[in-house]
Image (spheres, grey):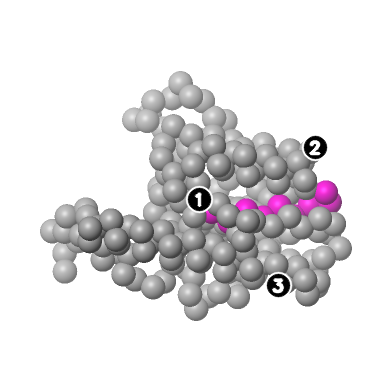
Protein backbone atom coordinates (compact mmCIF):
# COMPACT_ATOMS: atom_id res chain seq x y z
CA UNK A 1 0.00 0.00 0.00
CA UNK A 2 1.36 3.40 -0.97
CA UNK A 3 1.14 5.74 2.04
CA UNK A 4 1.04 8.67 -0.36
CA UNK A 5 -2.39 7.49 -1.50
CA UNK A 6 -3.81 7.46 2.04
CA UNK A 7 -5.73 10.32 3.58
CA UNK A 8 -4.20 11.65 6.79
CA UNK A 9 -7.12 10.32 8.87
CA UNK A 10 -6.79 6.87 7.32
CA UNK A 11 -3.05 6.89 7.95
CA UNK A 12 -3.62 7.78 11.61
CA UNK A 13 -6.27 5.07 11.88
CA UNK A 14 -3.93 2.38 10.50
CA UNK A 15 -1.07 3.57 12.66
CA UNK A 16 -3.20 3.35 15.78
CA UNK A 17 -3.96 -0.31 15.06
CA UNK A 18 -0.32 -1.24 15.48
CA UNK A 19 0.51 -2.64 18.92
CA UNK A 20 4.13 -1.54 19.10
CA UNK A 21 4.48 1.83 20.76
CA UNK A 22 7.04 4.41 19.71
CA UNK A 23 8.66 6.13 22.71
CA UNK A 24 10.97 9.15 22.75
CA UNK A 25 13.17 9.07 25.84
CA UNK A 26 14.75 12.35 26.91
CA UNK A 27 17.52 12.66 29.50
CA UNK A 28 17.79 16.02 31.20
CA UNK A 29 21.51 15.48 31.75
CA UNK A 30 24.11 16.30 29.12
CA UNK A 31 26.76 14.19 30.87
CA UNK A 32 28.07 11.20 28.95
CA UNK A 33 26.75 7.95 30.47
CA UNK A 34 24.73 9.83 33.06
CA UNK A 35 22.54 7.94 35.52
CA UNK A 36 19.46 9.48 33.91
CA UNK A 37 20.34 8.27 30.43
CA UNK A 38 21.27 4.86 31.80
CA UNK A 39 17.86 4.60 33.49
CA UNK A 40 16.23 5.23 30.12
CA UNK A 41 18.41 2.57 28.48
CA UNK A 42 17.45 0.08 31.19
CA UNK A 43 13.75 0.78 30.66
CA UNK A 44 14.26 0.34 26.91
CA UNK A 45 15.86 -3.07 27.53
CA UNK A 46 13.12 -4.19 29.94
CA UNK A 47 10.33 -3.32 27.51
CA UNK A 48 12.06 -4.15 24.22
CA UNK A 49 9.27 -6.54 23.23
CA UNK A 50 6.51 -3.93 23.44
CA UNK A 51 8.20 -0.53 23.11
CA UNK A 52 10.37 0.98 20.42
CA UNK A 53 12.42 3.38 22.56
CA UNK A 54 14.64 6.03 21.03
CA UNK A 55 16.91 7.79 23.52
CA UNK A 56 17.32 11.34 22.24
CA UNK A 57 21.00 12.30 22.00
CA UNK A 58 20.73 15.85 20.70
CA UNK A 59 19.66 17.90 23.71
CA UNK A 60 23.10 19.53 24.06
CA UNK A 61 23.05 20.51 20.39
CA UNK A 62 19.85 22.53 20.51
CA UNK A 63 20.50 26.28 20.22
CA UNK A 64 19.33 28.67 22.91
CA UNK A 65 15.61 29.24 22.64
CA UNK A 66 14.75 32.36 20.65
CA UNK A 67 11.04 33.15 20.21
CA UNK A 68 11.87 35.61 17.42
CA UNK A 69 12.91 32.83 15.05
CA UNK A 70 10.06 32.06 12.67
CA UNK A 71 8.99 28.48 12.04
CA UNK A 72 10.26 28.60 8.46
CA UNK A 73 13.71 29.60 9.71
CA UNK A 74 14.08 27.07 12.52
CA UNK A 75 17.48 25.39 13.00
CA UNK A 76 17.54 21.80 11.75
CA UNK A 77 18.12 20.43 15.26
CA UNK A 78 14.96 22.11 16.53
CA UNK A 79 12.89 20.81 13.61
CA UNK A 80 14.16 17.29 14.26
CA UNK A 81 13.37 17.48 17.98
CA UNK A 82 9.83 18.72 17.37
CA UNK A 83 9.27 15.99 14.79
CA UNK A 84 10.51 13.27 17.13
CA UNK A 85 8.15 14.44 19.87
CA UNK A 86 5.25 14.74 17.45
CA UNK A 87 5.74 11.27 15.98
CA UNK A 88 6.15 9.49 19.32
CA UNK A 89 3.22 7.68 20.93
CA UNK A 90 4.63 8.72 24.28
CA UNK A 91 7.61 10.43 25.90
CA UNK A 92 9.70 9.56 28.95
CA UNK A 93 11.67 12.35 30.61
CA UNK A 94 14.32 11.38 33.16
CA UNK A 95 16.25 14.28 34.66
CA UNK A 96 18.44 15.30 37.56
CA UNK A 97 17.91 18.44 39.60
CA UNK A 98 20.39 21.31 39.25
CA UNK A 99 20.35 24.08 41.88
CA UNK A 100 16.79 23.25 42.96
CA UNK A 101 15.47 23.41 39.39
CA UNK A 102 15.50 21.68 36.02
CA UNK A 103 18.73 21.56 34.01
CA UNK A 104 18.86 24.47 31.57
CA UNK A 105 19.31 22.14 28.60
CA UNK A 106 16.04 20.32 29.32
CA UNK A 107 14.07 23.51 29.90
CA UNK A 108 15.54 24.92 26.69
CA UNK A 109 14.39 21.87 24.73
CA UNK A 110 10.87 22.12 26.12
CA UNK A 111 10.74 25.86 25.40
CA UNK A 112 11.34 25.13 21.71
CA UNK A 113 8.00 23.27 21.67
CA UNK A 114 5.87 25.86 23.49
CA UNK A 115 4.60 27.53 20.32
CA UNK A 116 3.54 24.14 18.91
CA UNK A 117 1.06 21.45 19.92
CA UNK A 118 3.52 18.54 19.79
CA UNK A 119 3.17 17.89 23.53
CA UNK A 120 -0.55 18.65 23.65
CA UNK A 121 -2.38 15.52 24.93
CA UNK A 122 0.85 13.53 24.50
CA UNK A 123 1.30 10.82 27.17
CA UNK A 124 4.44 11.70 29.12
CA UNK A 125 6.16 9.85 31.97
CA UNK A 126 8.15 12.00 34.37
CA UNK A 127 11.15 10.74 36.36
CA UNK A 128 13.43 12.89 38.49
CA UNK A 129 16.47 11.03 39.84
CA UNK A 130 18.65 13.23 42.01
CA UNK A 131 19.93 13.85 45.53
CA UNK A 132 16.74 15.63 46.57
CA UNK A 133 14.83 16.47 43.39
CA UNK A 134 11.65 17.86 44.96
CA UNK A 135 11.85 21.29 43.32
CA UNK A 136 12.73 19.87 39.91
CA UNK A 137 9.88 17.36 40.20
CA UNK A 138 7.40 20.12 41.01
CA UNK A 139 8.73 22.31 38.19
CA UNK A 140 8.61 19.51 35.61
CA UNK A 141 5.02 18.59 36.48
CA UNK A 142 3.97 22.24 36.30
CA UNK A 143 5.71 22.87 32.95
CA UNK A 144 4.35 19.73 31.30
CA UNK A 145 0.84 20.45 32.57
CA UNK A 146 1.10 24.00 31.23
CA UNK A 147 1.90 22.76 27.71
CA UNK A 148 -1.01 20.29 28.02
CA UNK A 149 0.97 17.07 28.09
CA UNK A 150 -0.95 14.10 29.44
CA UNK A 151 0.62 13.11 32.77
CA UNK A 152 -0.53 10.98 35.68
CA UNK A 153 0.57 10.03 39.18
CA UNK A 154 1.09 6.44 38.01
CA UNK A 155 3.60 7.66 35.42
CA UNK A 156 5.48 10.11 37.66
CA UNK A 157 8.39 9.20 39.92
CA UNK A 158 10.77 11.04 42.22
CA UNK A 159 13.89 9.05 43.12
CA UNK A 160 15.73 10.74 45.96
CA UNK A 161 19.28 9.78 46.92
CA UNK A 162 19.64 8.45 43.38
CA UNK A 163 23.43 8.07 43.47
CA UNK A 164 23.23 5.21 45.96
CA UNK A 165 20.35 3.43 44.21
CA UNK A 166 21.97 2.71 40.85
CA UNK A 167 25.17 0.95 39.83
CA UNK A 168 27.69 2.38 37.37
CA UNK A 169 25.64 1.03 34.45
CA UNK A 170 22.47 2.77 35.61
CA UNK A 171 20.81 -0.43 36.82
CA UNK A 172 18.71 -0.03 39.94
CA UNK A 173 20.22 -1.94 42.86
CA UNK A 174 17.23 -1.06 45.00
CA UNK A 175 14.31 -3.46 44.41
CA UNK A 176 11.75 -0.82 45.32
CA UNK A 177 13.21 1.54 42.69
CA UNK A 178 13.08 -1.25 40.10
CA UNK A 179 9.40 -1.82 40.83
CA UNK A 180 8.73 1.92 40.77
CA UNK A 181 10.38 2.30 37.35
CA UNK A 182 8.29 -0.55 35.98
CA UNK A 183 5.15 1.00 37.48
CA UNK A 184 5.94 4.33 35.79
CA UNK A 185 6.51 2.66 32.43
CA UNK A 186 3.34 0.61 32.79
CA UNK A 187 1.52 3.84 33.64
CA UNK A 188 2.81 5.42 30.44
CA UNK A 189 1.72 2.40 28.39
CA UNK A 190 -1.75 2.61 29.96
CA UNK A 191 -2.01 6.29 29.01
CA UNK A 192 -0.95 5.52 25.44
CA UNK A 193 -3.55 2.77 25.16
CA UNK A 194 -6.23 5.09 26.50
CA UNK A 195 -5.18 7.83 24.08
CA UNK A 196 -5.27 5.40 21.15
CA UNK A 197 -8.70 4.20 22.23
CA UNK A 198 -10.01 7.76 22.41
CA UNK A 199 -8.59 8.60 18.96
CA UNK A 200 -10.06 5.47 17.39
CA UNK A 201 -13.45 6.18 18.96
CA UNK A 202 -13.24 9.72 17.64
CA UNK A 203 -12.32 8.45 14.17
CA UNK A 204 -15.07 5.83 14.13
CA UNK A 205 -17.64 8.16 15.66
Mark 2 to mark 1: distance in Å?
27 Å
The residue identified by callout 2 is 99
The mark closer to the camera, 3 or 2, is 3
- The residue sitting at 55% across, 42% down in the picture is 145
Task: Report x, y in % for residue 131.
Answer: 84, 51
Q: Which mark, by number, is residue 181?
A: none
Dot 2 or dot 1: first in sequence order is 2
Question: Taken as a whole, is the magenta stretch helix, strand or loop?
Answer: strand
- Callout 3: SS: helix
Q: Are marks 3 and 2 in contact (CB under 8 Å)?
A: no
In the image, the segment drawn in magenta is 124-132
Q: Quadrant of residue 168?
A: bottom right
Please tell me whether mark 2 or mark 1 is closer to you in this view: 1
Residue 175 placement: quadrant = bottom right
Dot 2, crowdedness within 10 Å: few (<14), some or many (≥20)?
few
Q: Position of residue 165 (x, y in %)?
A: 82, 65
User: x, y (%) of residue 127?
Assistant: 67, 55
Q: Nearer the viewer, residue 141 or 198?
A: 198
- Disc 3: CA contacts within 10 A as few (<14), some (14-19) or many (>=20): few
Q: Secondary structure at mark 1?
A: loop
Residue bearing the label numbered 3: 179
Amino acid sequence: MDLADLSFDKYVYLSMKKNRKKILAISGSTRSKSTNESVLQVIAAWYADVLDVRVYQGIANLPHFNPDIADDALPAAVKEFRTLVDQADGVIICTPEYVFSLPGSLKNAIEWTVSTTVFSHKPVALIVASASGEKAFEALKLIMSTIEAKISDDASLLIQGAKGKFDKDGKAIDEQVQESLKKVTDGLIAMIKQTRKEMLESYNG
